[in-house]
Image (cartoon, rainbow, N blue to C red):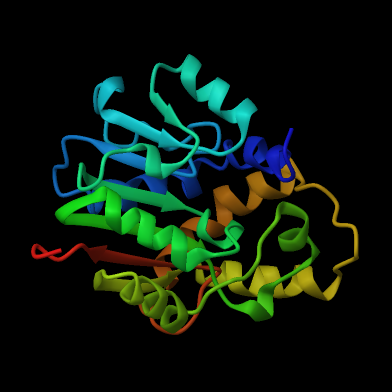
Amino acid sequence: MPHGGENLEVMANAHNYNRHLRDLVRRYSFGAHSVVDFGAGIGTFSTCLELPPENIHCVETEPLSRHEILNKGFNVYADVTELPAGSMPYIFSLNVLEHIENDAAALQDLHRTLEPGGCLFIYVPAFQILYTSMDAHVGHYRRYRITSLVDCVTQAGFVVEESAYTDALGFFATLVFKFFDKPEPAPLNPRLVEIYDRFVFPISRLLSIPLAKILGKNVFVVARKPLDS
């Protein structure tokens, strides 16, 4: 199991949180006939658009995760550059870019893969002040603000259409976690994750609407590849 793989299994049971992510992925798909899940993990979100398996393209570097995705019948690639240039109408990536040391190069690869006019949805952890030993444990190089993420995406050649923070209460929950942080983090507690997901996250989701440009545990951008690219 890769670093943080145990967390993927715990978070797979965070039903409200996962429903929120699926809603976002679907909202910005704009009827795409095929999709790339960049950094697909174990394929938790690969079926968001309810497309035929042959239209779902999963990019995942970890071999065990690729094997699990392959068993689900999806197309699987170790690197996004294995896909033809300008071939995909929609790419989404959930909590992946922060794991990549050269995020600018990764975004350029995504730009190459999208067809002109295609849409990119990126969702990542927010605010470096929230960086904890858990971030280090799972291989995060950084957390983002809206400005830093928008700049990075824009420099890769995209035009950003929307950006926002989300999970407002998660910002404060992570601050509390950081106060008690230790060099070696304990694994995510499934019971605490369930309680937060069931009782706190629905409220946090509502609060994120007025606080979308101010704070949140995560941040996302929606961007397009220009038609003349």
Rendered position, 22 above or below 52: below
- Measured from the top left, where is residue 39 in percent x and y? 49, 44
- Measured from the top left, where is residue 112 in percent x and y? 28, 54
Left or right relative to 62: residue 94 = left
Dividing the image into 4 quarters, which one contains the C terminus?
bottom left
**Residue depicted at x 74% and y 44%:** 3
- Measured from the top left, where is residue 212 in percent x and y? 38, 77
Rendered position, 121 above or below 90: below
**Residue depicted at x 71% and y 75%:** 175
Left or right relative to 10: residue 76 = left
Left or right relative to 31: residue 204 = right
Rendered position, 3 above or below 174: above
Count of numbered labels shown in the rendering: 0
Residue 2: name its quadrant.
top right
Front position in the image: 103 or 196: 103
**Residue depicted at x 27% and y 36%:** 49
Q: In this rendering, does residue 147 appear at all?
A: yes
Rendered position, 74 above or below 84: above
Identify the residue at the far right of this view.
183
Residue 165: name its quadrant.
bottom left
Q: In this rendering, does residue 211 appear at all?
A: no
**Residue depicted at x 74% and y 32%:** 1
- Measured from the top left, where is residue 205 in percent x and y? 43, 63
Front position in the image: 198 or 59: 59
